[in-house]
Amino acid sequence: MQWVCVFCGSSMGNRPDYAEAAAALGRLLAERELGLIYGGGNVGLMGVMANAALEAGGEVVGVIPEALMKFEVGHLDLTRLHVVGSMHERKALMADLADAFIALPGGIGTMEELFEVWTWGQLGLHPKPLGFLDVAGYYGQLHTFLDHMAAEGFLRERHRAMVAVESDPATLLARFQAYAPPEVVRVIARDTA
């Protein structure tokens, strides 16, 4: 694992814990000589995390669509900034560059990004680990809902186990190091009634 993609909010949220966790994750990645890949913005948790990683001597690669350069204030002081044509290109490039994926607190864009790479992993399109960094209990109810999805038969246990939910970034990275993707089953069983 050399590059970690982090999805997170372009806003700061309502708790100082979120910005503190974003900065701590940026520093930790730099200290461990893991490159950071993220959405390329210089605002919200994105900017806090990128700046912390850069200040700690880390490599930071941003990927931002042209249309969001002005809204997310594209970060011009990164190791590299890729400006792409669309959100689809952004997600594809981030996924190609990354060896693992983390979601810090964020909104629907953050959820969509992590859930998409999770879906790709479930389908066997990549073998990369992923997880939620549960800052101040932000993802607690989602964690419960994912268990509910599995209990109700809409998420197989092997696919539920693909995504880690941890409150400590070092623990999350340790789980990534031990990650083994599930066997991909190419046939979807049909219910017989």
Image (tube, grey):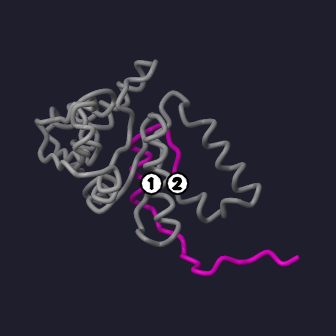
**Residue 130: mark:** 1
* The one of 145 and 116 positioned closer to us in this rendering: 116
* The one of 128 and 190 positioned closer to us in this rendering: 190
Residue type at mark 1? Leu
N-term mark: 1 or 2: 1
Q: Residue at x 40, y 41 (%)?
A: 169
Q: In the image, residue 100 lies at what x, y percent?
A: 36, 56
Q: Residue at x 27, y 32 (%)?
A: 72
Q: Main secondary structure of the magenta part?
A: loop
Instruction: Assess whether mark 2 and mark 1 are in contact (beta carbons under 8 angstroms).
Output: yes
Give the structural element (helix, strand or loop) at label 2. Answer: strand
Q: Indicate left or right for 86 with 148 as reference.
A: left
- Residue highlighted by disc 2: 163
In the orientation shown, which residue stands out farthest toward the right? 193
Q: Residue at x 26, y 48 (%)?
A: 37
Give the structural element (helix, strand or loop) at label 1. Answer: strand
* The one of 12 and 158 positioned closer to us in this rendering: 12
Q: In the image, residue 30 lies at what x, y percent?
A: 21, 42
Q: In the image, residue 183 lies at what x, y percent?
A: 54, 76
> With respect to residue 118, does 35 lie above or below?
above
Q: Residues in magenta? A: 164-193
Crowdedness near tag 2: few (<14), some (14–19) or many (≥20) residues, C-alpha within 10 Å: many
Q: Indicate left or right for 131 with 73 as reference.
A: right
